[in-house]
């Protein structure tokens, strides 16, 4: 779909409509930049330091670093394999699907929200990533499907992180709080 197929035309029309819309370029560029590694990684580092200090354990931080490192390890080969051309300002360059900036923002800020464990943070993370994606398309850096593909990849990585975090916290083996349930099982 990213290179050929029935949704390619609608994707490009939507991208052109967003790129030529009245969305202000300044804020769009600001949000697009939030997917840059020099912006996102210091935020993650600060959250990792804080949560490691607060919880007195390094395991979730190590898992978060591994998860974040998987972004370029997965995105770069996919971009090379699919070799999708970018929007007109970026053409004739190729390798735009999936968006590395959208994937970086989704994974890094998603990890921050999951590490800090707050429902309002998850909502803010979703809103922030929507703004990043819109900014990337508005500025002509990516097509909408490039961003959506990145969000799908990021969702898988964040689910894997959440699963691993539950295992680290002792909630992944079916027991509560890392302990086996007691009570009725002994009487059975």
Image (spheres, grey):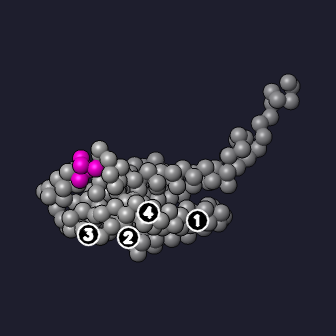
Of the numbered discs 3 and 4, the one sitting upstream in the chain is 4
The one nearer the camera, 62 or 123, is 62
Residue at position x 80%, y 27% from top? Answer: 184
Q: Position of residue 28 (x, y in %)?
A: 24, 63
CA distance for labels 3 and 2: 22 Å
Q: Earlier in the sequence, mark 1 or mark 4?
A: 1
Of the numbered discs in the image, which one, if any, rests on residue 116? Answer: none
- Tell me the residue at 53%/64% (across/down): 70
Rounded to the nearest angstrom, the CA distance separating label 2 from label 4 is 22 Å
- Say whether residue 52 is visible: yes
Label 3 to label 4: alpha-carbon separation? 16 Å
Res 31 seen here: no
- Label 3 with label 1: CB-CB less than 8 Å: no
Earlier along the polypeptide chain: callout 3 or callout 1?
A: 1
Q: Secondary structure at mark 4?
A: helix
Q: Which residue is mark 3?
A: 92
Q: Residue at x 55, y 62 (%)?
A: 67
- Of marks 2 and 4, which one's residue comes earlier in the chain? 2
């Amino acid at each position: 779909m990213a290179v050929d197929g029935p949704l390619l035309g609608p994707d490009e029309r939507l991208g052109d409509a967003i790129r030529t819309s009245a969305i202000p370029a300044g804020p769009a560029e600001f949000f697009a930049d939030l997917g840059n590694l020099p912006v996102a990684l210091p935020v993650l580092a600060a959250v990792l330091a804080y949560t490691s200090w607060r919880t007195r354990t390094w395991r979730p931080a190590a898992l978060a670093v591994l998860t974040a490192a998987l972004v370029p390890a997965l995105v770069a080969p996919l971009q090379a394999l699919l070799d999708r051309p970018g929007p007109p300002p970026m053409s004739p360059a190729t390798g735009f699907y999936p968006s590395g900036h959208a994937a970086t923002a989704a994974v890094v800020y998603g990890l921050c929200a999951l590490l800090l464990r707050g429902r309002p943070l998850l909502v803010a993370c979703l809103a922030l990533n929507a703004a990043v994606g819109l900014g990337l398309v508005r500025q002509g850096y990516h097509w909408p499907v490039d961003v959506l593909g990145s969000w799908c990849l990021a969702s898988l990585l964040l689910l894997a992180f959440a699963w691993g975090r539950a295992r680290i916290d002792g909630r992944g083996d079916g027991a509560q709080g890392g302990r086996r349930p007691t009570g009725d099982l002994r009487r059975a």
